[in-house]
Amino acid sequence: MIETLINIALFAMLITTAFAIVRMDHLFGVVMLSGVFSLLSAMLFVTLDAVDVAFTEAAVGAGISTVLMLGTIALTARREKRVNNRTFVPMLVCVVTGAVLIYGTLDMPNFGDPNAPAQIHVAPAYLNDSIEEIDVPNVVTSILASYRGYDTMGETAVVFTAGIGVMLILSGLRHRRHSLRQRLRLESRRRRKLAKRGQT
């Protein structure tokens, strides 16, 4: 009962945050709320016992993506440009996609159902055969490192690529600030020369 209430509260906060992101035109606030949305998603994954997915969501969604978007804002603008002609096609696409996704979940078994295919076929095989096949005493480690090795490698590649992107954006931001300072110095020198010529 308590877990259900926690899930409902997290879903309600996710929906509220999503509407706030859509309605806001200040990009800095949008980035901060996007980080909050990722943290709420990570908390929801933890309540669903998907700790590895929660870790990836917190690291990439709330951490690296926030830094990337903040660096992008520093290189562009801080407010969204207003568009006069509004179309309902994007809203229609989102509604249809959401309806299709909800329809696809109707055939899924209930959460925690002991008769679900994952509980009947996959889980017993992991628990019984992982020690003999992988020779690792920890079942979770054997699943992440061997059975789901490609998935773990993909997550690691995503985190690594995001980190490289953050470094590139920050280095470009430093270069831009350095060039801006040089331009300001040259401009101040030029004004001083013009002022001295005016005095003479």
Image (cartoon, rainbow, N blue to C red):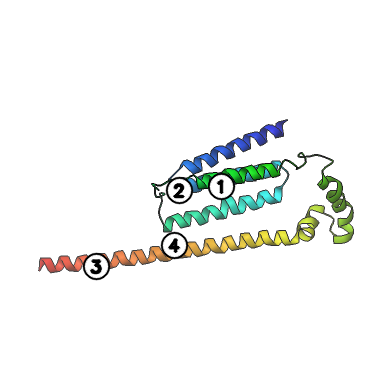
- Above or below — where is 113 with respect to 194? above
Q: CA distance from mark 3 to mark 4?
A: 24 Å
- What kind of element bears circle 1? helix
Mark nearest the camera among 1 and 4 is 1
- Give residue 44's position: percent from left, percent from top: 66, 42
Specify the quadrant that holds the C terminus.
bottom left
114 displayed left or right of 164: right
Residue 110 location, quadrant: top right
Q: CA distance from mark 1 to mark 3?
A: 56 Å
Q: Are marks 4 and 2 in contact (CB under 8 Å)?
A: no
* Disc on the earlier residue, 1 or 4: 1
Residue placed under numbered mark 3 in the picture: 189
- Give residue 132's position: percent from left, percent from top: 90, 59
Give the crowd class for mark 1: few <14, some 14-19, many >=20 residues within 10 Å. Answer: few
Which amino acid is tagged 2? Phe
193 displayed left or right of 113: left
Which amino acid is tagged 3? Arg
Residue at figure coordinates x 86%, y 49% from the top left? 121
Residue placed under numbered mark 1 in the picture: 93
Q: Give residue 67's mark.
A: none
* Disc on the earlier residue, 1 or 2: 2
Q: CA distance from mark 1 to mark 4?
A: 36 Å
Residue placed under numbered mark 2 in the picture: 28
Which amino acid is tagged 1? Val
